[in-house]
Image: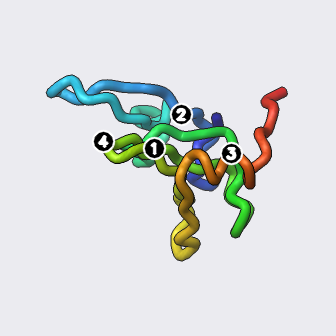
Amino acid sequence: MTCPKPGCGGYLTEKRSKRGKVFFGCSNYAKAKCDFVSWDRPMPKPCPQCGAVFVVQKVSRSGSRLRCIAVGCGWGADTDEAEAVVPVVQAS
């Protein structure tokens, strides 16, 4: 998936922290100094409330939850509820 920062042109990749925890960051971190990172897994589904390009999936002991990354949106749903509401977007 492409990076959500405007003008970046990079894509999101899975990386590991110094302690081994998985996070997701922009491939243009070293080149364009893009600072987008997320501990939550990006999902290729648009936000049903604001239309953001993708949402992120937070997995915890209590279950899995989707939420929007757009500032001020605040949309969130449990994974089971979101599957019924949000259509899956096929990447071309």
Q: Please, which residue is most extreme toward the bottom here?
A: 72
State the quadrant of the C terminus.
top right
- Badge 3: few (under 14), some or many (20 or more) residues near its Cα, within 10 Å? few
Is 22 left or right of 9, judged from the image as shown? left
Q: Secondary structure at mark 1?
A: strand
First of labels 2, 3 by sequence position: 2
* Whether label 2 touches label 3, CB < 8 Å: no
Percent coordinates x, y for residue 66 in the rendering: 53, 51
| Mark in front: 2 vs 4 | 4
First of labels 2, 4 by sequence position: 2
Percent coordinates x, y for residue 47 in the rendering: 68, 58
First of labels 2, 1 by sequence position: 2
Q: Which residue is mark 4?
A: 61
* Whether label 1 touches label 3, CB < 8 Å: no
Gap between marks 2 and 4, in whole Å? 25 Å
First of labels 4, 3 by sequence position: 4
Q: Which residue is mark 3?
A: 83
Gap between marks 2 and 3, in whole Å? 22 Å
Q: Is residue 33 visible?
A: no
Q: Which residue is mark 1?
A: 64
Percent coordinates x, y for residue 9 in the rendering: 64, 40
Q: Secondary structure at mark 2?
A: strand
First of labels 1, 3 by sequence position: 1
Gap between marks 1 and 4, in whole Å? 8 Å
Residue 12: mark: 2
What residue type is disc 2 on? Leu
